[in-house]
Image (cartoon, helix red, strand yellow):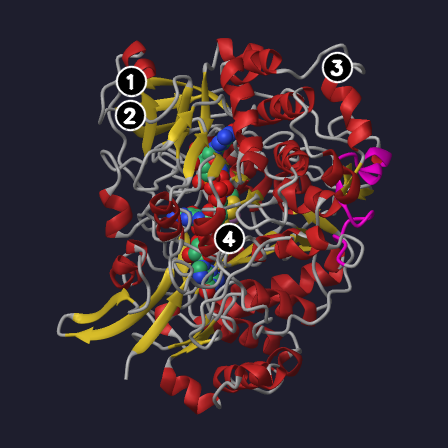
């Protein structure tokens, strides 16, 4: 009998070898991800949190002592009872004194695969049993798009699940124009699990079938088809200008589908005056765009003609909306696709996220999987997730969001489980200051991550490999019985056990556990799912455990065309927008009156870009994309991730031209800096990146030279030491990580020792 485990980067078969357990990609996966292969070692590495740990001031003086010393004093390892008592006391005291509006439980992050042990569901249920918490909306992934897309084309989660499948693209798409590529390195993952890795295979099959590929991107490592790809190097954050120029050309040359616009969209006539320049005196033609994008006008014009001449898909990665004015690129994309009139045709229309995750282009079984019930949250306050530092620093301040006037709550207790804010947030030096404002920070972690090092109490929790669970993703065909691979490391417990113990101390144990053990919960979750979908003819729980992996499509090969129904009959199958159609001009957004997000796609200069005055001091635009050797910061300490580093630092991609001008050679340690911070990285000189752009992927654990000085040197290559902490706009307040200028120099000082993966300092209580 084969046993399995499921991770965000794939399903793995588990073999018990002579040297211990070994993971390998499961038999039906054509392109398993190497990320998981070093997981067994990584999960047993030296930097696990082994015992409950408390910051020294708490151990010596009691809960809530000296928040200003957070992350800059030693820890004390204590027994479970002592740590749980301290955490329960802090929680009770702070809720009694300040109410549940003072508890931040948003706890953003990817945590691990598995429906029962899903870390956020667990912490949310626990906090709901205590009267609720301040939550967050959207994600770092899709801050701008999750807010703008429902207004203009429909719910982003549904869009995500409904993309035209790779097998249809292969047969019908003649031209695939990708803004930001379609990176198979990102297709390695999916929230929940990956069944069969499709992105590389999908692109290669299209290439073999004769699809032509064009990549509009500041770098070209992100579209690997096995064949020819034309690369149009564009300045970062300027794609909206290029798309507007494509729209302009289509209109001026009569290449747009006026009929489709009339039947399937609203507001084109209100967008047109802006496009043609009658409202602002600037026609958005290809010459205008060239001065912004750096793409020759002639190439942009020809691209418009090429798109109109054949069955084409114009697609975009999500990175483009993780930027200042991030609402505009996807809005401009949908507008161009509506003008081309191919939406709903097989192999035509738009894509938003091919390559972003395995889900996009993979047919979804259309069932909602088992989930651990979170209960209900009576607290109304929330923040768009990337506004965490603003909230902590400016309680009581008003801000705008999607037509609402909101106020930041005054947070006194943070409980974080399953995310790494000192990975995911922008301008981490600012977050360090913000993090010292609340009175208590409790973290459940597996490893000594920077977020654990910046906590008051760290509860050690198990990894996927140490527990049983149900593996499922809304976008995948397989459901997996995840089996325990080895015993819990150190004194770690599951998140569930930690909350059950805390709940007992706080008088809500029965509400939290519902009187059930982990095993009982898992059986119930599975049985509930099986009973909800009799059409799937699923086995009983024992049968599921025995099978190990279930195929929800029963071996058939599904295919899908996005918006085919809407195209065929927009009245019978309207979109979920207010008008039921594509909103090129959106009355709702217009009615909010936001200067930084008007009623139709608009080019607005980002706060930092290669055309801004700031580029005189900081002449390089830094892209911080997703790492190919890990998932965000997860497994940064694995052998596979470390093998990709240069002198232990994260690699930064730089053009030969920019490296040469700075005396930088491949393999040198470099310092990147701007007025927000500085970090070290290892130079990788490449012909695959446009001059003026550098790429430092995320994921290197934040490793400041000191936590208690202002804006210290970050030693490891975490781009968020440099990024800007602003919202995309008043509409979404989304993460704007890709808007960032830097300078770079060869690092000539003595190389500081890396401490990212080291243990914190431990002390005995005096
Ligand atoms: N500059 C820049 N910054 C970015 C981005 C970017 O493009 N550029 N991208 C953003 C995006 S899209 C995202 S999604 C975020 C990702 O940010 P996160 O999702 O916060 O990053 P992860 O590294 O996945 O953090 C997950 C953490 O949960 C812990 N964990 C895993 N399983 C469990 C569990 O079962 N229980 C508990 N208690 N803990 C667990 C892991 O050890 C890890 O520390 O980063 C964002 N940040
Ligand atoms: N291996 C791996 N895969 C992952 C993740 C991971 O951490 N590791 N994270 C997952 C998560 S949470 C998410 S949200 C997705 C994110 O998926 P995306 O947001 O699509 O991913 P990125 O890698 O940030 O960026 C994709 C490409 O956009 C390009 N790009 C950046 N800025 C611009 C621009 O201004 N214009 C143009 N034209 N191109 C630009 C970059 O060169 C990059 O190759 O990835 C998922 N997949
Ligand atoms: Mo993400």
Q: Is residue 185 visible?
A: no
Residue marked by disc 4 = 360
665 sits to left or right of 743? left
Residue of label 1: 656
Residue stretch in magenta: 573-591
Disc 3 secondary structure class: loop
In this rendering, is residue 189 above or below 596? Answer: below
Label 1's element?
helix
Q: CA distance from mark 1 to mark 4?
A: 34 Å
Q: Which residue lies under the disc numbered 3?
A: 277
Q: Give the left or right position of residue 442, taking residue 252 as reference.
A: left
Q: Where is residue 188 shown, x and y percent of the image?
A: 38, 53
Q: Looking at the image, tell me whether mark 1 or mark 3 is earlier in sequence order.
A: 3
Q: CA distance from mark 2 to mark 3?
A: 39 Å
**Spot occupied by residue 352 in the image (x, y as percentages of width and height):** 56, 44
The C terminus is located in which quarter?
A: bottom left
2 or 3: mark nearer the eye: 3
Looking at the magenta stretch, what is its main secondary structure?
loop
How far apart are the alpha carbons under marks 1 and 3?
39 Å
The residue carrying pointer 3 sits among few (fewer than 14), some (14 to 19) or many (20 or more) residues within 10 Å by Cα, namely few
Q: Residue furthest left?
A: 18
Q: CA distance from mark 3 to mark 4?
A: 36 Å
Label 2 to label 4, Cα distance in Å? Answer: 29 Å
Along the line of sight, the residue nearer the viewer: 301 or 356: 301
Label 2: element kind:
strand
> Mark on residue 686?
2
Instruction: Look at the numbered discs 1 and 2 and tell me whether their residues touch, using CB distance below 8 Å.
Output: yes
| Image quarter of the N terminus | bottom left
């Amino acid at each position: 009998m084969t046993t399995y485990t499921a991770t965000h980067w794939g399903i793995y078969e588990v073999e018990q070898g002579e040297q211990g357990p070994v993971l390998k990609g499961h038999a039906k996966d054509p392109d398993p991800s190497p990320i998981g292969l070093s997981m067994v070692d990584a999960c047993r590495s030296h930097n696990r949190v082994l015992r409950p740990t408390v910051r020294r001031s708490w151990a010596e003086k009691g809960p809530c002592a000296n928040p200003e010393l957070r992350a800059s004093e030693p820890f004390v390892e204590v027994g479970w009872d002592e740590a749980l008592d301290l955490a329960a006391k802090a929680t009770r005291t702070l809720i009694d004194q300040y109410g549940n509006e003072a508890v931040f439980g948003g706890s953003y992050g990817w945590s691990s695969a598995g429906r029962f042990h899903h870390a956020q569901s667990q912490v949310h249920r626990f906090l709901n049993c205590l009267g609720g918490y301040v939550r967050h909306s959207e994600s770092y992934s899709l801050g701008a798009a999750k807010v703008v897309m429902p207004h203009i084309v429909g719910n982003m989660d549904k869009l995500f699940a409904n993309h035209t499948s790779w097998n249809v693209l292969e047969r019908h798409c003649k031209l695939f124009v990708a803004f930001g590529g379609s990176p198979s390195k990102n297709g390695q993952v999916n929230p929940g699990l990956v069944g069969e890795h499709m992105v590389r295979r999908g692109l290669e099959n299209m290439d073999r079938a004769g699809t032509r590929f064009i990549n509009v991107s500041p770098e070209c490592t992100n579209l690997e088809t096995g064949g020819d790809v034309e690369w149009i190097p564009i300045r970062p954050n300027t794609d909206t200008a290029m798309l507007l120029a494509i729209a302009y050309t289509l209109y001026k040359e009569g290449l747009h589908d006026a009929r489709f616009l009339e039947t399937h969209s609203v507001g084109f006539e209100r967008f047109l005056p802006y496009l043609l320049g009658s409202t602002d005196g600037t026609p958005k033609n290809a010459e205008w765009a060239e001065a912004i994008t750096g793409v020759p006008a002639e190439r942009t014009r020809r691209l418009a003609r090429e798109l109109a001449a054949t069955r084409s898909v114009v697609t975009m990665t999500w990175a483009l909306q993780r930027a200042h004015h991030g609402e505009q690129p996807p809005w401009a994309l949908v507008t161009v696709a509506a003008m081309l009139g191919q939406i709903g045709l097989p192999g035509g229309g738009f894509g938003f996220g091919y390559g972003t995750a395995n889900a996009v282009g993979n047919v979804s079984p259309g069932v909602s999987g088992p989930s651990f019930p979170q209960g209900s949250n009576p607290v109304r306050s929330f923040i768009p997730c990337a506004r965490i530092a603003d909230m902590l620093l400016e309680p009581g301040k008003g801000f705008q969001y999607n037509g609402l006037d909101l106020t930041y709550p005054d947070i006194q207790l943070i409980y974080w489980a399953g995310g790494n804010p000192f990975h995911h947030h922008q301008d981490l030096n600012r977050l360090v200051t913000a993090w010292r404002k609340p009175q208590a920070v409790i973290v459940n972690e597996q490893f000594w991550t920077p977020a654990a090092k910046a906590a008051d109490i760290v509860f050690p929790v198990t990894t996927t490999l140490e527990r049983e669970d149900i593996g499922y993703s809304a976008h995948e065909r397989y459901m997996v019985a995840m089996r325990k691979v080895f015993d819990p490391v150190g004194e770690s417990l599951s998140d569930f056990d930690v909350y059950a113990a805390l709940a007992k101390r706080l008088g809500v144990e029965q509400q939290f556990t519902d009187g059930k053990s982990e095993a009982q919960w898992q059986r119930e979750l599975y049985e509930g799912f099986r009973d909800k979908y009799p059409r799937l003819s699923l086995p009983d729980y024992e049968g599921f455990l025995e099978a190990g992996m279930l195929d929800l499509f029963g071996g058939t090969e599904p295919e899908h065309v996005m918006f085919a129904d809407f195209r065929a009959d927009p009245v019978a199958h309207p979109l979920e927008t207010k008008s039921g159609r594509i909103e090129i001009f959106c009355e709702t957004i217009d009615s909010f009156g936001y200067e930084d997000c008007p009623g139709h796609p608009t080019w607005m200069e980002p706060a930092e870009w290669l055309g801004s005055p700031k580029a005189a001091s900081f002449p390089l635009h830094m892209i911080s994309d997703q790492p190919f050797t890990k998932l965000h910061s997860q497994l940064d300490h694995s052998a596979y991730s470390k093998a990709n580093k240069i002198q232990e630092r994260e690699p930064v991609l730089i053009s030969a031209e920019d490296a040469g001008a700075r005396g930088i050679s491949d393999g040198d340690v470099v310092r990147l800096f701007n007025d927000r911070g500085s970090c070290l990285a290892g130079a990788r000189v490449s012909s695959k990146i446009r001059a003026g752009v550098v790429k430092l992927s995320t994921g290197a654990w934040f490793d400041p030279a000191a936590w208690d000085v202002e804006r210290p040197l970050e030693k490891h290559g975490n781009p968020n030491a440099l990024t800007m902490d602003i919202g995309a706009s008043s509409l979404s307040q989304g993460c704007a990580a890709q808007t960032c200028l830097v300078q770079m120099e060869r690092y000539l000082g003595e190389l500081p020792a890396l401490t990212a993966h080291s243990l914190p300092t431990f002390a005995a209580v005096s």
